[in-house]
Image (tube, rainbow, N blue to C red):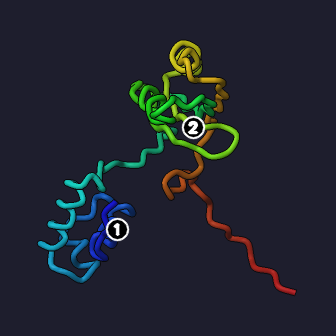
Amino acid sequence: MKELTELKLKVLDLLNEDARRSPLLLATLIGVEEEAVKEAIAELEADHVIVKYAAVVNWSKIEEETVTALIEVQITPERGRGFEGIAERIYLYPQVKSVYLMSGAYDLLVEVEGRNLREVANFVSEKLSPIDSVLSTKTNFILKKYKQDGIIFEDREEDNRLMVSP
């Protein structure tokens, strides 16, 4: 793993807050030349430290409905490859949004997205469960997202109550 310079760490932190920030704005916020920021970003992209720029979307605000499930998967590790081969087999499915190796009661946490409950259920029963190394699955459907990636989705009303002190 490569050690990152202070400049690169600052660039990453600021882009993580808002990926739309221009190199000029980043340079101004950090206090360096714009060319240094452009070079840092190019190196971070080339080294696959920055792998994608993405928007955080509150999908509940639009008409198109999707269903997201978090599936807890217990597996038997493969000889010589451990969890890697099974994780790869799972993350290659287009329905799979994320796969995490976990500590605790299960081995992998798999985030799956579908158009409806039946589509997710079919994925679990037809694709995920039949994998030889999969011992068990437990599917948890996300009912509502309140916060994701540090972004609060709820429209909160301001508290206008008067403060009462003893």
Quarter assignment of residue 85: top left
Disc 1 element = helix
Residue in the picture at 52% in, 35% down: 111
Q: Answer with left or right where residue 98 lies relative to residue 15.
A: right
The label number, if any, that marks residue 14 in the structure image = 1
Q: Are marks 1 and 2 in contact (CB under 8 Å)?
A: no
Residue that carries the numbered disc 2 in the rendered image? 109
Q: Residue furthest left?
A: 35
Residue in the picture at 28% in, 78% down: 29
Q: Position of residue 33 (x, y in %)?
A: 15, 79
Q: First in sequence: mark 1 or mark 2?
A: 1
Q: Position of residue 105 (x, y in %)?
A: 70, 40
**From this viewpoint, is residue 44 visible?**
yes
Kind of residue indicated by mark 1: Leu
Q: Answer with left or right where residue 29 lies relative to residue 70.
A: left
Disc 2 element = strand
Q: Nearer the viewer, residue 158 or 81?
A: 81
Residue in the picture at 63% in, 33% down: 72
- In the rendered image, the quadrant that contains the C terminus is bottom right
Badge 2 local density, few (<14 within 10 Å), some, or many (20+)? many
